[in-house]
Image (spheres, grey):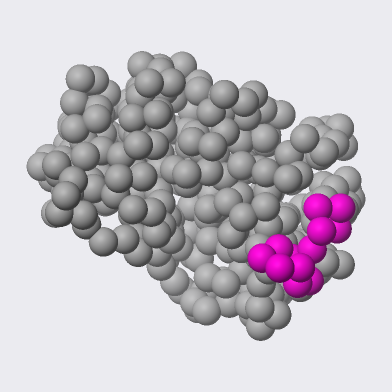
Amino acid sequence: MKRPPALKEHDRAVILSPAGRIDAHHVTGAAALLKKWGLEPLTASHALGNQGRYSGSVEERLADLQQAMDDPSVRLILCSRGGYGVVHLLSHIDFTSFKSNPKWVVGYSDITALHAALQLQGVASLHAPMAKHLAEEHEEDVAVSHLHDILFGRSLHYQLPVMEHLALNRTGQAKGRLFGGNLSVFTSLLGTRYAKIPKGGIFFLEEIGEHPYKVDRMIHQLRLAGVFDRIGGMIVGQFTDYEEDDQMSAPLLQSIRDAVNGYSFPLCFGFPVGHVKENYPLLMGMQAQLTVNDEIIFFTQ
């Protein structure tokens, strides 16, 4: 797996919208922060477009992404937001230039689909905050600070205290390639070439606004598809904007734990990744080490 080169001062960064539409002030705010980092921010032609729930037509969104991937002077592609729509682009992207001149692609949520496509090409990418977060949070924000450090060449090392989810965790250590992302997006890719499950990999997931029974169904779909048979470790990130259903046999997080009770891989809940302010960056496709004990979760890449 190729890790794109670290950024340096005066590198060009393109903000684009491969899925949902975005408010202009979030793009201008993110561009201002990138400029503070010493980068040269650019806004793609259709990044601020509006076509229903999308930023533009499939052709317009694809053109922005393809141009940024092919331009050798662009070193960072920052997705403005997720939403829905990346799946429209996957089979049309030409990765020829990108593979020979890899650059950072940053995003999460619906961008999970693009991360999966990049892993097929053997290029690492960053599951990390997007334009809205960068615009609304100052540069000392913990997730933004981690994003800056990783983009500019630092290794990734998180040490997190185990708190309210101790009873759900399963202790142990795992080492393998990191994959996953948004649960519903990743699950929608099962049965396609984009849902590549690395043997012994570390699988992580997060979700927003899904009913507990739908989450339960997706988790069991993963189980029946053999995902849990192949992995070496699992990270359950943040599940937000949902209400528990008292007609379910267990609360949402407990239902996830119950679905993987027959496995022995290390497992942690409550990891700071997802649709939350503390959305810690993770290197998609790169080797990772996860250690879960009764007091601390260690994660390094």
The residue shown at (24%, 30%) is 259
Query: Residue 74: where, in percent of width, then height?
Result: 82, 55
Q: Main secondary structure of the magenta part?
A: loop
189 on left or right of 276: right
- Which residues make up the magenta segment? 49-60
Residue 127 visible in rendering: yes
Looking at the image, the residue that sits furthest to the front is 247
Tell how many labels.
0
* For residue 60, above or below residue 227: below
The residue shown at (81%, 53%) is 58
The residue shown at (52%, 79%) is 136
Q: Is residue 239 magenta?
A: no
* For residue 300, above or below residue 241: above
Query: Residue 116: where, in percent of width, then height?
Result: 61, 36
Query: Residue 197: where, in percent of width, then height?
Result: 50, 23
133 on left or right of 212: right
Front residue of 45 and 186: 186
Q: Is residue 51 magenta?
A: yes
